[in-house]
């Protein structure tokens, strides 16, 4: 039942395209019916070849009561009258003219069938593509709503696999599973009905033989799949073994189904020769219809496997879609238009799930417009502290207040709308310089982008690129240098013009010239904003309005540079270990 519910949720993605689905179903019916009619064209074709187009006795038969005017109502008589009706329809002055009519009918028949098949394929593919587009869009939008805790608990490759591989399996379960199963079922229904109508006794022989063959094939198939799995586990000569396995199962299946056809061919042929069951032309039609059932029967048996793959993939997809983000708006949350007074950490403690506390009882206030430098040894909890400001996480205990209001009472969109974040790892995209700077801002004139680039000391190097602001910078901006990447990230933040800036500065890998350009850009970026800086630079620390020293998740010191340096405690030790070496490096250069 659970699998059925999952697959029904997958199928529900097709609901918006119900008109196309109806068209697909109608085309499937037309194609199935025309497949049966095309096989029925064997009747006049064989007769005109072997009887020379003679219609002797047709008129007498027709005068006996019309197409189905048979007193005894026997099936054989019905077939004979159908035969005469078809022949009389195509009858012409000469056998060649009769043959010409038949060939024109076959041409028209296959043209209509081919056209319907083409339209069926186009509509089916359009439904598949729209469904996987909708699923991927849903996944993508939902992932944007998830909190950082979700991504920390999930592997990036796993998430990407859900959007790519698993959605691809869902597409196969729709195309090769659901839609193909309906198509094959209709074909089997039409052709099977045709077979039973022609001769139910001979059809019964086929129905007895084919299931037995199918059981044998299934047993061999399971054994081959076990060999395949064992080969995958061993990973030795896997390609060769799998190729032989897959090829082998196809040969076995083909042999099994065609062997069933040979049994019917022998039995039916023997009956025809003895004159017991059918005339030769009807037997040929029967045989053609029965053999035509084999292909849809094969693919119909494979549809279940495709559907099972889709169900398994659907479970993994819905596991993401059903996951609720940890950070959500409160029912009575309000929008804000900016910061007016400041931000306060009120006895904040935080831990990740069941781990130990990363922050414990942290409390301090920041006034609007201040630059706050957050310093401390590696792993002290600096990044976690600033992650609470845009509500990437909520405090486990205590609260973070903006203008006296708990951040949990403010809508996430409006809160993050007044914030800009520049991370230590510069995030750039395989797009143009212009689009990277203007990321997240729509319909922005180039002049605004240029102004931001100039403020970030990036305009000169951008202008020197082959196509200027339209130059594509490659995946993660790898076609430009590290300092250039940082200046683009700063330009992006300047363009957004946030009231609150969270900045993780890191320039250890930059040369002196690039570092000076970046530092000048940072100073412009920090002006006239409320800034939280995870500081790595001497200048940022010494010029900060407030220095927050975190050690072991606790706020151990807070104040200005000179006061903390004079106190000679944790900050002085950090200064001596880190910043003094940095200062000496600047002097040496």
Image (tube, rainbow, N blue to C red):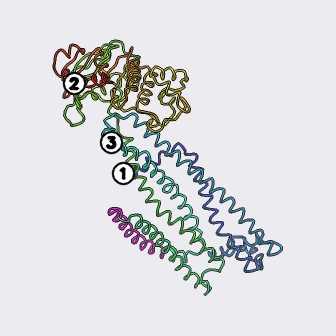
Q: Residues within 10 Å of mark 3 (few under 14, many from 20)?
A: few
Nearest the camera: 351 or 585? 585
Residue 101 drawn above or below residue 385: below
Nearest the camera: 82 or 452? 452
First in sequence: mark 2 or mark 3? 3
Question: Is residue 534 in view from this perspective?
Answer: no
- The residue that label 2 is drawn on is 550
- Residue 477: image x %, image y %? 45, 35
Span of residues in magenta: 207-235
Disc marking residue 48: none
Residue 277 drawn above or below residue 312: below
Q: Residue furthest right?
A: 93
Nearest the camera: 224 or 578? 578
Question: Residue 245 is drawn in which quadrant?
Answer: bottom left
* Left or right relative to 543: residue 200: right
Query: Is most of the magenta stretch helix, strand or loop?
Result: helix
Name the element at disc 2: strand
Q: Nearer the viewer, mark 2 or mark 3?
A: 2
Q: Magenta stretch: residue 228 in it?
A: yes
Residue positioned 25% across, 25% down in the render: 581
- Residue 184: image x %, image y %? 54, 61
- The residue that label 3 is drawn on is 154
Disc marking residue 2: 1
Residue positioned 33% across, 34% down in the render: 148
Question: Residue 425 is drawn in which quadrant?
Answer: top left
Name the element at disc 1: helix
């Amino acid at each position: 039942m659970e699998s059925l519910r999952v697959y029904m949720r997958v199928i529900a993605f097709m609901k918006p395209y119900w008109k196309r689905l109806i068209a697909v179903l109608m085309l499937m019916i037309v194609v199935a019916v025309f497949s049966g009619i095309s096989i029925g064209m064997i009747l006049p074709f064989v007769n005109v070849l072997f009887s020379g187009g003679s219609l002797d006795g047709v008129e007498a038969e027709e005068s006996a009561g019309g197409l189905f005017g048979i007193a005894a109502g026997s099936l054989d008589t019905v077939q004979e009258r159908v035969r005469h009706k078809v022949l009389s329809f195509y009858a012409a002055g000469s056998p060649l003219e009769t043959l010409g009519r038949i060939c024109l009918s076959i041409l028209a028949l296959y043209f209509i069938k081919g056209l319907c098949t083409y339209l069926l394929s186009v509509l089916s593919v359009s439904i598949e593509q729209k469904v996987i587009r909708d699923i991927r869009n849903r996944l993508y939008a939902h992932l944007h709503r998830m909190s950082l805790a979700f991504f920390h608990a999930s592997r990036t490759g796993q998430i990407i696999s859900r959007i790519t591989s698993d959605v691809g399996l869902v597409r196969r379960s729709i195309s090769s599973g659901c839609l193909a199963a309906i198509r094959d079922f209709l074909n089997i229904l039409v052709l099977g009905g045709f077979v039973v109508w022609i001769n139910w006794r001979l059809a019964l022989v086929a129905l007895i033989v084919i299931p037995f063959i199918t059981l044998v094939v299934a047993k061999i198939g399971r054994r081959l799949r076990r060999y395949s799995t064992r080969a995958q586990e061993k990973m030795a000569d896997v390609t060769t073994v799998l190729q032989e396995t897959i090829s082998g199962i196809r040969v076995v299946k083909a042999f099994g189904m065609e062997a069933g056809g040979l049994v019917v061919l022998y039995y039916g042929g023997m009956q025809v020769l003895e004159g017991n069951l059918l005339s030769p032309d009807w037997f040929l039609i029967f045989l053609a219809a029965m053999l035509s059932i084999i292909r849809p029967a094969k693919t119909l048996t494979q549809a279940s496997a495709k559907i099972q793959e889709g169900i398994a993939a659907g479970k993994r997809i819905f596991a993401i879609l059903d996951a609720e983000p940890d950070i959500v708006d409160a029912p009575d949350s309000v929008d804000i238009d900016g910061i007016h007074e400041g931000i306060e950490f009120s006895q904040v403690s935080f831990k990740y799930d069941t781990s130990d506390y990363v922050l414990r009882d942290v409390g301090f206030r920041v006034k609007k417009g201040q630059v706050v430098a957050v310093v401390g040894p590696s792993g002290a909890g600096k990044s976690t502290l600033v992650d609470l400001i845009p509500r990437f996480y909520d405090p486990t205990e205590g609260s973070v207040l903006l203008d006296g209001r708990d951040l949990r009472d403010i809508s996430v969109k409006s809160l993050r709308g007044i914030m800009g974040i520049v991370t230590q790892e510069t995030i750039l995209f395989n797009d143009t310089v212009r689009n990277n700077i203007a990321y997240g801002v729509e319909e922005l004139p180039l002049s605004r982008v240029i102004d931001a680039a100039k403020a970030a000391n990036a305009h000169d190097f951008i202008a020197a690129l082959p196509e200027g602001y339209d130059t594509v910078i490659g995946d993660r901006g790898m076609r430009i240098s590290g300092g250039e990447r940082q200046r683009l990230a700063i330009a992006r933040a300047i363009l957004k013009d946030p009231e609150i800036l969270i900045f993780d500065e890191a320039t250890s890998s930059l040369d002196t010239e690039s570092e000076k350009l970046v530092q000048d850009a940072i100073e412009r970026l920090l002006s006239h904003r409320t800034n939280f800086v995870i500081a790595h630079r001497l200048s940022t620390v010494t010029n900060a309005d407030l220095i927050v020293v975190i050690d072991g998740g606790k706020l151990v010191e807070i104040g200005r540079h000179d006061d903390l340096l004079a106190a000679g405690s944790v900050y002085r030790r950090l200064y001596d270990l880190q910043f003094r070496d940095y200062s000496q490096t600047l002097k040496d250069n």
